Image (tube, grey):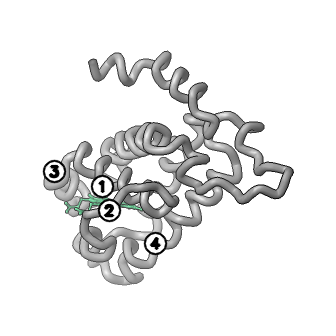
Amino acid sequence: MMSCLRSRSMIVAVALASSAWSGPALAQGSTGEPAKPLYERLGGLKGITLVVDDFIDRLVKNSTLNRNPEIDAGRKRSPAPYLKFHVSTMVCEVTGGPCKYIGKDMKSSHAHMNITEKEWDVMVGEFKKSLAKFRVSAKEHQELLEIVGKTKTDIVAPAGAKG
Ligand code: HEM
């Protein structure tokens, strides 16, 4: 079942079914109608969970991040499906969807890992790869990066916190 869900044909099918994944369909209406919430432009939970699933899989196996022993320990404490659930509901909520994020705040979930600027940049690089893989259009790509960027001051440890 999982291999079926992950199969390329499934991803392509969802990508095609959701207008959020094809460039021209994402353009704002030229008739002056209000822009759809980002949540809808991303294809709702189907689109968001596909990207988050791919993104968390990349983070979990990233060797630069796992060299930080506290991140590695956090991975063992908080399994990938749990993180995917929380990150998906968070993205759903902050993009205007119907979800309610019920996880911890970003400071208390990350402070103990002393995440560095470099590790943050690695995470952003992986996020961009997931957005590119699902062909999230430039406007939505940018909006998502801005949303993630707002969490940075709560997630990255103050300079010099390490060692
Ligand atoms: C370099 C960047 C990041 C790293 C290395 C990282 C790593 C982790 C790890 C290892 C955990 C589990 C911690 C534990 O159980 O002790 C965690 C929790 C979590 N992270 Fe991150 N994270 C990063 C950035 C982000 C960002 C940008 C978001 C969302 C915008 C996010 C959302 C979450 C959420 C929702 C949880 C779970 C909170 C809970 O347990 O209630 N993380 N993160």
Q: Residue at x 38, y 59 (%)?
A: 90
Give the mark, 4 or 1, whose residue is nearer the N terminus.
Answer: 1
Q: Which residue is drawn at 64% across and 54% down?
A: 36
Q: What residue type is labelled 1?
A: His
Residue 142 appears in which quarter of the rendering? bottom right
Q: Which amino acid does label 2 sit on?
A: Tyr
Q: What residue type is labelled 3?
A: Lys
Q: How far apart are marks 1 and 2 (CA)?
A: 7 Å
Disc on res. 86:
1
In the structure shown, which secondary structural element does the residue marked by tag 1 occupy?
A: helix
Mark 4 near ligand 1 (CB under 8 Å)?
Answer: yes
Disc on res. 152:
4
Label 2 belongs to which residue? Answer: 101
Mark 2 near ligand 1 (CB under 8 Å)?
Answer: yes
Q: Is residue 146 left or right of residue 49?
A: right
Q: Is residue 5 left or right of residue 30?
A: left
- Using a 10 Å C-alpha cutoff, classify the residue at mark 2 as few (fewer than 14 neighbours), some (14 to 19) or many (20 or more): some
Mark 1 near ligand 1 (CB under 8 Å)?
Answer: yes
